[in-house]
Image (cartoon, grey):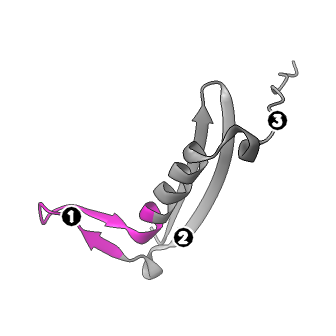
Amino acid sequence: MTMKKRVVCVYDGPRRLMKDDMMMNIEYEVRVPLGDGKSYVTDLDVETMKRTEAMHEATLEERGPWMPETMAM
């Protein structure tokens, strides 16, 4: 496998704030080892978590109006 796909969805209750699909070639992946020496986290994972935290910390004004999605049948 040379490509990894990551999908992140950020929710605030029933409201979806963001959805992002990312594909990344593992050749360019930067792995940061964790304290146990066996596990790692990638730089893309760290940046993704920063983006989701920013969405959750945004004010209601920054998030904009919420228009519930209607489900078509």
Residue in front for this viewpoint, 8 or 25 = 8
- Residue appearing at x 60%, y 26% in the figure: 13
Task: Kindly report the distance in space between the C-alpha atoms of the residues bearing marks 3 and 1.
Answer: 39 Å
Is residue 3 depicted above or below 67 in this figure? below
Say whether disc 3 or disc 1 marks the residue closer to the N-terminus. Answer: 1
Query: Depth-wise, is mark 3 or mark 2 nearer the camera?
Result: 3
Residue in front for this viewpoint, 37 or 64 = 64
Residue in front for this viewpoint, 21 or 12 = 12
Residue 56 in the image, given as x and y percentages of width and height: 56, 43
Say whether disc 3 or disc 2 marks the residue closer to the N-terminus. Answer: 2
In the picture of the structure, the residue carrying the numbered disc 2 is: 24
User: Could you say which quadrant of the image residue 40 lies in?
Assistant: bottom left
The numbered disc on residue 65 is 3
For the N terminus, the quadrant is: bottom left
Task: Kindly report the distance in space between the C-alpha atoms of the residues bearing marks 1 and 2.
Answer: 21 Å
Residue that protrudes farthest toward the left in the picture: 36
Is residue 47 depicted above or below 60 in this figure? below
**Amino acid at dot 3:** Pro
Say whether disc 1 or disc 2 marks the residue closer to the N-terminus. Answer: 2
